[in-house]
Amino acid sequence: MAIRKILGIETEYGIITRGAEESNPIAASSTLVRAYATEVAGQPGRTRGVGWDFEDEMPGNDARGESLVRSYAPEVETHLVNAVLTNGSRFYVDHAHPELSTPECSNALQALLYDRAGEEILLKAMAGARNLLPEGQEILVYKNNSDGKGQSYGTHENYLLARSLPFGRIVTHAITHFVTRQIYTGAGKLGTEVPGHRTDEVPYQLTQRADFFEEEVGLETTLKRPIVNTRDEPHADAKKYRRLHVIVGDANMSEAATFLKLVTTAMWFAAVEDGAVEREWRFARPVQALRQVSRDLELSQPIEMADGTSMTALEIQWELLALCRDWAERFGLDAVGEEAGRQGLALWEETLAGLEDDPANVADIVDWVAKLRVIDGFRRRHDLRWNAAKLRAMDLQYHDLRPEKSLARRVGLRTLLSREAVANAITEPPADTRAWFRGRCLQRFSDQIVAANWDSMVFDVGAASLQRVPMMEPSRGTRDHVGKLVEEATSAADLIARLAT
Amino acid sequence: MPERELKKKAAPQRREEEVDEAPTATAQGDKIKAELDDLLDEIDEVLEANAEDFVKSYIQKGGE
């Protein structure tokens, strides 16, 4: 049986400062994180939130098991502001962007919930930052992946896989899904940003990210980006687990698209892990296929396969859906969560059928369709060229988080979550992963927590040395598992004593 | 894949029906167009005042 597909999303937001002579994105990002940790989350008696513990960060490890001279490991930036939140998230400054990593989630519906809660956290941080900024200045963030001028920043997904699954098999099946799922995961973009090409060579394309990928497989995330990233840093027991770090996706404004991106990918890898996928779909040229699909608004261009045949992205997605259905019948939906799996299969079919008939059918699900509908409508009304400033402003403003400015909030996207659930997830951790232990300890004992990271927490309980509590099992440390123990502990020292027995 | 076969067969049938009931299809089309018109009116209002400056000043550093 496939292991539980625990998952999460890391989102780097675009950031600008209005009203300032010069926009310093690193300072602005730090201000946002500080504003949230001190002004909003309001940890009394503390000037800073609980810091991040970098002890186990090894982003240079390569899943292929060999050191490659041409791969450059990213540097871990330990000097920038970091906060660990009571909902189990990490909110920090990465390069020149504010980044929010959701807690570890037990299913795709829950991961969607925490991605949405992340948007609300950013909104609160923007409001809190007004108190820290000079009069007339304002920090604005955008949940997109490109500035339209050749700079890209990522939205990364993470999936827990069994270490026993050979990496070569992961790569083959990952490329198949990542190239073809773009037809519903794309957030839409005006123009192209491939170096050496005029922006308006491509009027509009399905994804923000396809222009920036140059390799099939590799360790990099900032240059020569690969379709399959080999960073091997499981943040868990490395003998049992692998964390597949997916860097190829877009940030979605549509709840349904975020959910679909996560649930199809989780299900696909669960099916692969269970040996339910016997056939392979190998593209003749995967990087070219990624860009071709992104530019095929009619969803009709066949992709050339390695064996000389050809198929469209839509045809391949129908086959992956059929395989996942078969897998669900044989193995059940436990690995992806019953409810998320059931809803996921239904939405997957609805979306493919809608795209096949006429993409306009899924304007309430798929971001690139919703964005194109409104941009093209505006273009026709005002008789504009595709690269007109007003249209490019709309492309950016689609991703504005502010309700009064966001275009995504106006185009009629379907919602899957209640306001109450999102509001609750801003401060409360998921109950059924180790994120519960992290979040609940931060709620109860933040004064005695020196640092935290994904797989451990460090307590200062007044003893001679700091106490590190390892959390190497992502599915343990749940409310069911340690709830009684954490709730009954009268202090952090008592908690440590109880954990030791 | 029985579901998919059904969907594929269903689509052309529906198109034929649409031809028979052209007035309904037009009414539906008008409704969608009216909705889009309303949306575009609203966008005229919420769009950043100086689109040109906004787009120019939106400069990011690479991330990840």
Image (cartoon, rainbow, N blue to C red):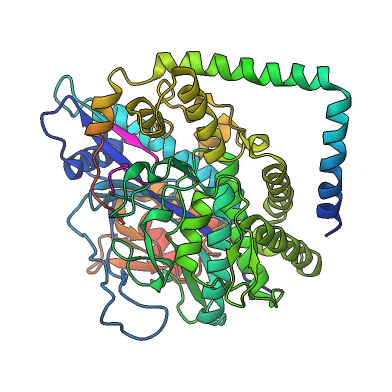
Residue B34 image position (x, y, % from top left): 63, 14
Say which of A163 and A34 sits in front. A163
In the rendered image, is residue A107 in sight?
A: no
Residue A293 image position (x, y, % from top left): 53, 55
What is the magenta segment's predominant secondary structure? Answer: loop
Residue A21 image position (x, y, % from top left): 10, 29
Residue A434 image position (x, y, % from top left): 50, 60
Residue A141 is a magenta residue: yes
What residue is drawn where x is 24% and y is 69%?
A: A465
Image quadrant in which you'd find residue A389? top left
Question: How many labels, in total?
Answer: 0
Residue A30 is a magenta residue: no
In the rendered image, is residue A290 in sight?
A: yes
What's the magenta region?
A140-150
> In the rendered view, would you say B40 is above or below A132?
above
Image quadrant in which you'd find residue A119? top left
Say which of A258 and A1 sits in front. A258
What residue is drawn where x is 71% and y is 59%?
A: A321
The quarter of the picture where the N terminus of chain A appears is bottom right
Q: Is residue B32 left or right of residue A423?
A: right
> In the rendered view, would you say A51 is above or below A470?
above
What residue is drawn where x is 60% and y is 36%?
A: A417
What residue is drawn where x is 70% and y is 78%?
A: A278
- Residue lying at the far left of the rendered structure: A21
> In the rendered view, would you say A411 is above or below B13?
above
Q: Is residue A499 left or right of residue A126?
A: right
